[in-house]
Image (tube, helix red, strand yellow):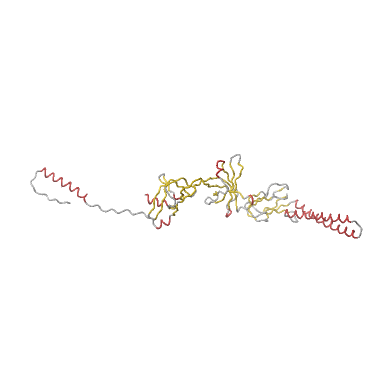
Amino acid sequence: MHSFILLKMKTSPFLRLTFFCLVIALTALLPGCQPKPATQEATAFMLSDTMLSRIRIDTARIQSVRSELTLVGRIMADENRVIEVFPLVGGNVENVKVELGDYVRKGQTLATIRSGEVADFERQNTQAEADLLLAEKNLRVAQDLFESKLNSQREVIAAQKEVERAQAEVSRIKEVYRIYGVGKSSTYTVKAPIDGYIIQKNVNQGTQLRSDNANSLFTVGQISEVWVLANVNESDIGRVKPGMTADIQTLAYPDELFHGRVDKLYTVLDPGTKAMTVRIRLPNPGLKLRPEMHTTVTLRYDDGGQLVTVPAGSVIFDKSKHFVMVFRSRSAIETREVTLLKSLGDVAYIRTGVKAGERVISQNQLLVYDALND
């Protein structure tokens, strides 16, 4: 409380009232004259060592503007590495040794067929060998008689020709045996012509096969390298060129991206869809890609011009605007508004806002953004 000295003076009541009001006003003003306590200055933002280790910094750079084309396709085995196995004889299928999808080695038994045709080959072979023995015996007799002047040179020549004919028949039967892969039995063995996978199987135990059967029993293919066949709409044909890189995604492996190249453009369009078929060749590590799998194919091509690019993950969308966090040092980070042309895969094309060579935060940038802009 403030004490005041009241002077004893003979004054009028009006003057005393005026003096009292003045004292009250001065008392009210005195607290405002006291000095205010000093406020603390705001501390500058700085990334901690932990946060610095959690972010990733990339440099903006100029790249050609690219666009992409998305197609639907399916996996196929390389036709140059696929062989259909046909039965060379008719008969009854006694045993099938493999199933669809099995891996087989060249020469491995796929199935066995008991065949009357094979049994007839054995009969023909026996007859041919007997005819050869008889012809050789007749030739020796003719030669002995010729030496004894009991027959003519013509008879010796005729006997020699019979031997040659019999030898030719024996050779023919042996070649048939080699081609058909049969031995001295009525069983015909179907063998794998190459190493590969059984990608088609059209026979079961007990199947009756006709000698004029036109259908293959098995299809064996090598899938260490496969094809993707995809359709390109007529309006997009001009954008697709041989040698383009292609990214392949499948339902079976949604988190894995396979890479290939456009190998061939088929010149004939499908009359119904007006689409052109494009063939993409790609390696098949681990044999994950199997024939008839459905795929999504992404082709990228130059769209003309160049722009500054940053990783697509570095762009922040907030309040209907796009931002990036420009990094100069751990204590100098700027929230920069940018004009985005488009994002393509993991690349964002920037019209304005960032210059080539500037560094931006591309991982955990939202944490930094929130800390700076709250």
In front: 341, or 345? 341
Is 146 situated left or right of 308 in this image? Answer: right
Q: How many marks?
A: 0
Residue extending farthest front: 305
Q: Percent x, y for residue 1?
A: 17, 51
In this picture, is 61 found above or below 268? below
Locate residue 235: give its quadrant.
Answer: top right
Image location of residue 118, percent across then percent down: 75, 52
Left or right, 50 with reference to 80: left
Is residue 174 shown left or right of residue 238? Answer: right
Residue 145 at what x, y percent from top left? 90, 59
- The residue positioned farthest toward the top in the image shown: 272
Measured as percent of width and height from the top left, residue 224 is found at: 60, 54
In depth, the one of 285 and 356 nearer the eye is 356
Quick one: 230 or 90, which is closer to the camera?
Answer: 230
